Image (cartoon, rainbow, N blue to C red):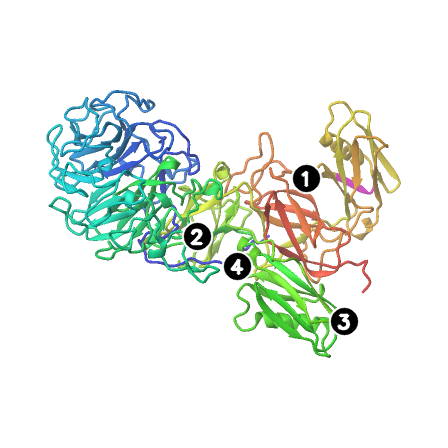
Amino acid sequence: MKWTVFLLFSIASLNAQDFVTGQAARLEVGQRIWSDQYPSATERNLGSISGLAYANNTLFVTDANRVGGTPNNNRILLFGNVNSFIPTPHQELPVSNDRCPACVGSATVVLGQPDFFKTDLLRAAQNITVRTPLGVASNGRYTAVADADFNRVLVWRGIPVSTNQAADLVIGQSDFAGSAPGRANNRLRGPSGVWLDDKDGLWVADTGNSRVLYFGVPQNNGQNATLVLGQPDFNTNVQPQFGTVVLNVANNTLVNPMSVTTDGTRLFVADFGANRVLIWNSIPTTNQAPADTVIGQPNFISYLSNNSSALCASNGTDDNGNATYPDRCGATINFPRFALSDGKRLFISDSGNDRVLVFDRIPLLLNGASADAVLGQQGDTLNQSSESANPERLSASDSLRTPAALAYDGQNLYVADTFNRRVMVFTPGDFQLQLTSVRNAASLNIYAVGNVVVGGTITADDQLTITIAGKDYLYTVVKEDTIASIIDNFVSLINAGDGDPNVVAFPNQVLSAVLLTARTGGASGNDVTLAVTLSTNATETLTTSGANLSGGQDAARIGPFSLISIQNNTLDLETLSVPLDRPLPYELGGVQVYIDGWRAPIQSISPQAITVQISAAVADATSANAIIRVQHKDGTVKVSAPLAVLIIAENPGVFAQPGTDPRPAVAFHASSSATGTIAVDGSAKAGDVGSIVIGERTYSYTVQDGDDLAKIRDALIEIINAGDPEVTASVALPFTTIRLAAKVPGPTGNGISIRASVPEGASLLLTALNSELCCASTAGAPITNDDPAIPGEQITVYATGLGLLKGNPAPPQIAGQPYNGPVPTEPVEFVSALIGGKTARVISCGLKPDAVGIYEVILELNPDLPDNPFTNATIAQSFQVSNIFTIPVVNPKVAP
């Protein structure tokens, strides 16, 4: 069988090597997989972290926080030889059996604790102890840690090389035993941020004193600062206590600054309490020097968090005509914790909005500038890091929760993701994918649909109106009209010009209906309203399928072991494919696809789509990331910006022909023999007798101690197959069902009667779902308008995304390999089906033998279905419903 996968969405081409809104992290440090959030203290696992630094191929992480994150591990980790676990963006990754090759890093040194597993807090201040270390900085020649609760900064000469190595110097206290807070040129109160400039000068964000201090090159314990910013002198704090309604805010004041950094030319301060970042365009040299630029506020005297009415475009008006504004936008800030520049770009950790703002150019003399990109959220007005509203996004590969410090190594931006207990590594790509580019390869998109049935009698001049999302389509009946012409005229009205902005209309003359499909896939189509009105005394009728369109779902939620398609129309690729009845390669036409750093087997590439299979191993996660790597024939390599993939237990999609949804299914007649089914239900009670009658032949089984429904089913199958001359019996899954099929193919078997019975009062239930065998056809023949399905017939459709298989142990599901395990199989989550608005019996649903990632689903149509060349159908698992597909049905019992 030849499989072709079609895609409907495309890649958005943006500037190469820029960070883009919504991109995922490429790598993570600190957790086994993206969604673990495992609270621990080892050389690989992080707690709720705060500080980051990068220098000399070493990543520094302070494993503590002051925002209530747990655990608070009170230590500093050094990850040496970063190049050994952070591959370059274009690097080819090997084929690996690791669960998450993108989850990397093992610390080589721990400071503040005697080993990687200790997290002691209640220890006295010494040269080897810390209490809530929040900030860290290194330039390779010095390393500094803001030891907040001991009100000091510890300094090491060089980069520490051994676990629990003692600090060489202390700033903010006269000796290592001191820990009391103070306000002077040699005292500190809860410092949060430190920075070492290219001249080895030490800068400190003295948070509790609402100031920034400069100490010069660290040389002595208790060294005096030589410069103060944010206050008029070393002994003053003009700010009231944090949380006071009225603050003293200007271009030369600070309110609880969390970080201070420089790029060698400019100075940046995250002014946490005033919800802003201040920029000095040159390194200040005088006390209380004023800043030149403010980000997050329209001017230097404003300090409101998310000051959207002053910084954001209006998003409408309220009932009184007053302008309304979004909660946030790319220009607003809510409690910034870090600002960092590489000399060209500016990165801001906007912790209260759970995001990082990226400015492609440093805003100079432009107050209230808007960011060019947002990391950690899918838009600049969104915050999707809510435990109640979006639990699956809490630790997604593109999500942040209270990001703190930042570090940059020239290629990668490191983000301390505090509440997710990890370091996120963001890397620009050569090209970008739309946020919904990764989709179930069968369903592509799941559109909401609806209909309006037209009936009654024709009366000229009657006025009929269909209203779609508030827009009226009025048709005046003429005497020549028929029901069919009214339907056609409504379709023409709705599709006229550029068409209705919300739906596309189609005629269905068999159902006497106007069919409507949402233009936008997903759940948003369910919001499209539908209503009808008639003029007074009109004799025609209009009946809607509901007050809204329905059935729209998200095909970008991916079940494990799915075939997935990635839109890629910015790439000039060949069209190549591998049949799904043979092993898939890990590279095709120079294309590789990485899921969590694991190289995925590829089925096809084209200028429109790349189709791969995702591993069954992702079932332990709610998120993954995807990267496309392409090596062109001239040797050049391009990689995509990483894209998040949302993982759920199952999300079925049914393969269908190309076109506009609902699309005709890739469907086949299931049996050359007449078929029927017997359901085995109830409970097993010893002594109950179940009987199946085929023609005039009765086959009975008496329930034994220890039987369950499956044993009863199997016993009846064995009895029938031992001697019935006309019928064979077999197991049907997912329920305890017996499938009967005539031994002789063709119409000869049609009409063989079947019955089932149990004695009155029995706990066992046997139900014949058909009164006779039915609907012999040609097994494997496509269902078409010329060879339609018949009510009562069993048909076959093919799907992907149905998740893991049942079993103890479960049958092996090896990505990229044709399935050759035991049969029959069934998915963990049972499958149901609706065809023509009626329940269709699922006769079997399991991995198709000798095929990669394909589930073969055999469905028995309801015997009462009417004629309809576009009979709508879906399959479903739990709350996940497939794309709507259609099959032609002709009922031979209905008179023409």
The prevailing secondary structure element of the residues shown in magenta is strand
User: Magenta stretch: residue 577 in it?
Assistant: no
Residue at (30%, 46%) from the top-left corner?
275
Three-letter code, disc 3:
Thr
> Which amino acid lies under the numbered mark 1 shown in the image of this protein?
Leu
Instruction: Residue under label 1, please give it.
Output: 733
- Tell me the mark number nearer the camera, choosing from 4 and 1: 4
- In this figure, what is the number of numbered marks? 4
Q: Which mark is residue 520?
A: 4
Can you identify the residue that label 2 sits on? Answer: 435
Which quadrant of the view contains residue 369? bottom left
Q: Dot 4, crowdedness within 10 Å: few (<14), some or many (≥20)? A: some
Q: Position of residue 736 (x, y in %)?
A: 71, 36
Helix, strand or loop at label 1? It is loop
Q: Given this view, does label 3 or label 4 mark the residue nearer the observer?
A: 3
| Apparent side of residue 217 relative to residue 373 in the rendered image (left or right) | left
Return the x and y of residue 594 as percentages of the image width and height: 41, 45
- Mark 4 falls on what kind of element? loop
Magenta part of the protein: which range?
Answer: 725-729
Q: Kindly report which numbered mark, 3 or 2, lies closer to the viewer in this rendering.
A: 3
Name the mark on residue 457: 3
Lower position in the chain sequence, tag 3 or tag 4: 3
Which one is earlier in the sequence, the residue at label 3 or at label 2?
A: 2
Looking at the image, residue 333 sits to the left or right of residue 856; the answer is left
